[in-house]
Image (cartoon, rainbow, N blue to C red):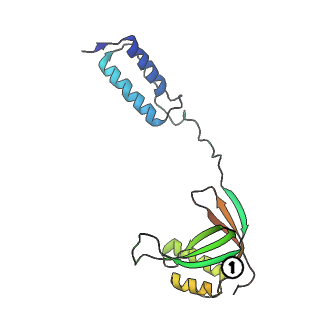
Amino acid sequence: MKLCATPEILKRLDSLKRLADPANKASAGEIQAARAAIKRILDRYEINDYEEPAPRSRASSPPPRPSTSKPDVETYRVQRVTYSVHQKRGTGVYAPRTMRVGYQIGPRQWQYEWICFEHTGFARRKAEEWWKRRAPTRVPATADDAVKLANNGALREPESITVRTGDPFDTIIDYRLRSSRCA
């Protein structure tokens, strides 16, 4: 047996109906919760003239807003370059290591990238491309070999780097290399 709906129940039902309306700017979770509350009220109370809101359709959804924060791209003059072997924290002794390259672009400002000589697949191919762009020598197999060669002047170093910011991590997207290797 259903109970008779009081004015307070009808008022609550109206507010839930507005919230469940797809034209409202409520999130999908809020709409779902409102519909569940409406169903509970309808199951408990006798309400004759209730009209259920239309389900949210893709056509009625507002178009996605374009992102207002687009990535910034800046070019920096490189003052100094450092090379070191990097072992990711928390990995075992058999995990592949990388060559960490540090570019000093200001008095206390550095930009880093990790070159994956000991990895396979895409990461290794990117490391090979990176090396071939800077040195006429064969691509090293290990991060140790790469660091030794780099610290002995085997690589052309960049005059400047172009960095994209605004993503979760800053990314070096281009280099302007010196015409000859630096010793």
What residue is drawn where x is 63% and y is 81%?
Answer: 132
Judging depth in this view, the residue of 71 and 58 nearest the camera is 71
What residue is drawn where x is 42% and y is 75%?
Answer: 95
Q: Residue tagged by mark 1?
A: 157
Give how far across and how far down residue 15 sits, in percent: 46, 21
Give how far across and how far down residue 49 sits, in percent: 40, 13
Measured along the vertical axis of the image, is residue 154 above or below residue 46?
Answer: below
Residue 46 can be seen, yes or no: yes
Side of 93 where 165 appears, left or right: right
Residue 139 can be seen, yes or no: no
In terms of secondary structure, where does tag 1 sit?
loop
Judging depth in this view, the residue of 49 and 155 nearest the camera is 155
Amino acid type at image mark 1: Glu
What residue is drawn where x is 37% and y is 29%?
Answer: 36
Q: Quadrant of residue 100?
A: bottom right
Side of 14 where 3 appears, left or right: left
Measured along the vertical axis of the image, is residue 117 above or below residue 68?
Answer: below
Judging depth in this view, the residue of 65 and 57 nearest the camera is 65
| Quadrant the N terminus occupies | top left
Furthest residue to the front?
107
What residue is drawn where x is 60% and y is 75%?
Answer: 101
